[in-house]
Every structure is written in C-alpha cells, then in structure tokens.
Image: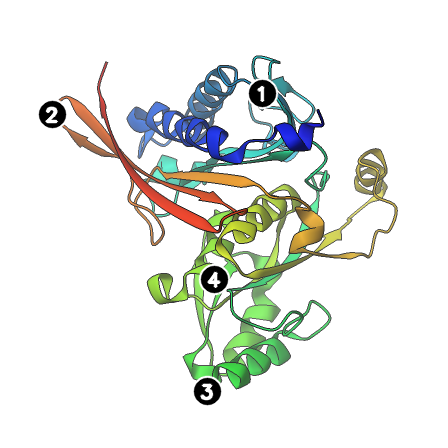
Amino acid sequence: MTARADFNDRMLSLGLARVAEQAAIATVNLIGRGDEKAADQAAVNAMRQQLNLLDIAGVVVIGEGERDEAPMLFIGEEVGTGNGPGVDIALDPLEGTTLTAKDMPNALTVIAMGPRGSMLHAPDVYMEKLAIGPGFAEGLVTLDMSPRERVAALAKVKGCSPRDITVCVLERPRHEDMIAEIRSTGAAIRLITDGDVAGVMHCAEPTQTGVDMYMGTGGAPEGVLAAAALKCMGGQIQGRLLFRNDDEKGRAAKAGITDLDKIYTRDEMVTQDVIFAATGVTTGSLLAGIKREVGFYTTETLLMRSKTGSVRRMTYRNPMH
C-alpha cells in the first residue's frame, strides 16, 4: 500500500488537533512573562511528545529554523510511533514567541500534515509573499505586480474603491517603501509585529478579520505553513524565495531547489491534500486565547481538512493537573 493510500486524514485530524492544543496549554504559565525562549521550549516539548504518540511515520519538513536559534523540532526529525502512513509535517510550535512573551494578540500553535512528499522543503531563508482570500480568479494579483497594481486589481474585481481594501503587513524596516506605496493608493494597512502565518490566514476570512490581502517578506517555512492553511480555507498565495548570500543559496541547493527565482503557487508549495490545526495562545482575530477558570484551561482550535474543505472550530476544556 502506498503512503498516499494510507493517509487517512479523517482519522489523523483529531490527533493533530490534540498536538496543537497541548503545545498551547504548555505555554499557559509563560504568557506575558517576558521569556520567549522558555515559551518556545515548552511548546516544542509538548508538541514533540504528542506527535510521538501518533501512529505515523512522520518527518518534519518545515520546522523551526536556525534563524530562531530555538530548541527546535528540527527539519528531518522523525516523529510518531513509526507505525502507520509516511507523512510530511510542517509546524511552528509557537507562532509568535514575542507575542506570547508580551501577551499580545494572535499567538498560535500551528501544525500541518500531508502525505510524504506533499510539501515544499523550503530552506530557512526569506520569502516574498502575496496572499488573497477565496473566490478570485487565479493570478488576479501576482508578485510581479507593484503593490499599487495589486491593490487596484483587487479593488476593481471587488467593485470597491482602494480605500475599502485592507492589507496586512509585517512591521519591519524593510517594508517601509512598500507600506508608503500601499498607503498612497488610499488602502488601509494592518501592521502586525509577528506571526505571519496568522497574517496570511486573515485573508481567508475577510468578513471576520477585515483583511483582504497579505504582502511582504517573512520566513519561507512560514510561507509553506500558510499555504497549507489556505489549501484548506481557500485563497491564493504566491511565494518567491529571497537569498541574501551564498550560504542561503547553499541551503536551497541542499533542499533540492535549483530555480532560485521561481514563483511558487499555493498548490506548488503543498501538492496534495493536507490537514491543518491551530490553537490560540493569546486571543486574536482568528482564535480565542487560552482561558483559565478554576480547575480548567479552555482552548479554541481551528481544525481543517483540504480534502473536504471542512473547517471545524473546537473548544476544549481541559482539567488542570
């Protein structure tokens, strides 16, 4: 039997939700405590422990990059019991370590799983990203357009003024020119300090989040995770890897990437059906954060399957031990 035939996304999805939930719960006493490394470590440990309980032969293809110098679930690490389907796993045990440490909105634990060979092995470099929600013609906006052209194209199709468009952008000095250009169109910008997986996911639910488009550069691994989310939620993402030096080009070669200028679409980053789970750590526009009650923690988890397009929101009340 091939790994693909073995990949029973329905049976594995609840297990994946548990992985995200336990990673979030592990951070509860570190929210707002100012220690990013400790929060990340707690999430990593819990995520690894839960993954190793699943009947999968899993390989982490998108893990915590060297850039974070974190206690990683490293790329190439094997997880699971070894019994069961071969799967690719993309994860960010704590997307928004700074957000957690400062008790700011939109910190999440994030994990995606697909059949072996289904996800782009993105090296730990930067990626230029552009995303919009579902319901638009493929290629309506592209990375080859200027920010101004993207806003105009989306506004035209939506039948609205650029002033009615909101773009989510990571607040970084490298984005200053792009931010100025977007604002010159009259569009609004929602700046986020961290957490661009959540930033991209915001586009998929514009009525709930108020965000129409995401653009800017961030980590390539997070780009693949965001593509997995949009594969389930609907929406488009394009990504182009950016290399600052020969060392980074070497990482691409090691990951088997030869065309350094290629623009990846969502379905090139994630080629087969996947499942995706995210649990809120701090309350944000997508998910509620962890709530403490006497004797209980309550979490909210988004669990999605691209095969069926199902999006499930789960509230989990967990007795404190």
Q: What is the crowding at mark 4: few (fewer than 14 residues within 10 Å), some, or many (at least 20)? A: many
Labels 3 and 4: the sequence-earlier one:
3
Residue 188, x across and y down, in percent: 43, 74
Q: CA distance from mark 3 to mark 4?
A: 18 Å
For the residues labelled 4 and 2, say whether their Cβ atoms are less than 8 Å apart: no
* Secondary structure found at label 2: loop
Question: Which residue is nearer to you in this view: 33 or 282?
Answer: 282
Labels 2 and 1: the sequence-earlier one:
1
Q: What is the crowding at mark 3: few (fewer than 14 residues within 10 Å), some, or many (at least 20)? A: some
Q: Residue furthest front?
A: 1
Question: Which residue is nearer to you in this view: 55 or 149?
Answer: 55
Labels 4 and 2: the sequence-earlier one:
4
Q: CA distance from mark 1 to mark 4?
A: 32 Å
Which of the image's four quarters has the C terminus?
top left
* Secondary structure found at label 1: loop
Residue 195, x across and y down, in percent: 48, 47
Residue 10, x across and y down, in percent: 48, 34
Residue carrying label 1: 56
Q: In the rendered structure, which amino acid carries the disc numbered 4?
A: Cys
Residue carrying label 4: 203
Q: CA distance from mark 2 to mark 1?
A: 36 Å
Q: In the rendered structure, which amino acid carries the disc numbered 3?
A: Ser
Q: CA distance from mark 2 to mark 3?
A: 49 Å
